[in-house]
Image (cartoon, grey):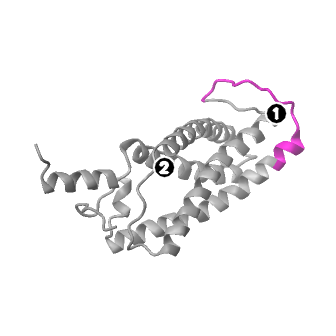
Amino acid sequence: MKPTAATEESTAAANWRYAAPAVALHWILAVLITGMAAVGWYMVSIEDQPGSDWYFDTHKSTGLVVAALVAARLAWRLTHRPRPLPASVPAWQDKLSGITHLLLYVLMVLMPVTGYLGASYSKYGVPFFGADTPHWAAVDKDTSELLFTVHSVLVWVLAALVAIHVAGGLRHLLLRDGVFERMGLRSRPLDRPTD
């Protein structure tokens, strides 16, 4: 049976969108990383106060979850390439989008790695929601502080990149060019993109 034009249109639109696992990982990580940054900034401001340990332990534990989800997202992204942006998107925006996405992936890897290593070289180690994880590194305060400094700088770089990413997404939402809807949020029925 020959597919109808409506069926072909629907299939094209479905292929244009990111697949469900990519969408789910994107939004779960967006929420977790935003929460992690907020908790991180807050816990540093109350570092010497009673009860701050809970925030540090929760931050570290959630960081391990984020690391696992980032690994899953990277594996998915490397085996499932999205369709290119439509020709209506200027070349400079397409290039900026590619660079921003690449840097976001790099930072999503570096953030948990530097945090994990910094905690590993500290005397507190890396708890996982109350359970101890192997403490493989000898305590080295200087190394720990250096890694935490890098971790702190990277979160500001990540925040700047996320702001650029969000601004780009909102611009596409206003343009109603279908790019925003690729990540599973629809402002209108998604038509087949014009290439």
Instruction: Name the side, left or right, on which 98 lies relative to 183.
Output: right
The amino acid on which the numbered mark 2 sits, given as a three-letter code, is Val
Residue 87, position as x, y percentages in the image: 39, 71
**Position in image of residue 64 (x %, y %):** 61, 36
Q: Label 1 is placed on what type of residue? A: Lys
In the image, what residue occupies the spot 70% across and 54% down? 45
Which disc, if any, is residue 161?
Answer: none
**Residue 42 appears in the rendering:** no
Q: Is residue 138 left or right of residue 10?
A: right
Measured from the top left, where is residue 75 in percent x and y?
53, 39
Point out the stretch of residues depicted in magenta: 129-146
Is 145 one of the magenta-colored residues? Answer: yes
Q: Is residue 193 above or below residue 171?
A: above
Disc 2 target residue? 31
Q: Residue at x 57, y 39 (%)?
A: 71
Q: Which mark identifies residue 123?
A: 1
Q: Quadrant of residue 1?
A: top left
Q: Is residue 87 visible?
A: yes
Mark 2 element type = helix
Please report whichever mark, 2 or 1, sits nearer to the chain's N-terminal start.
2
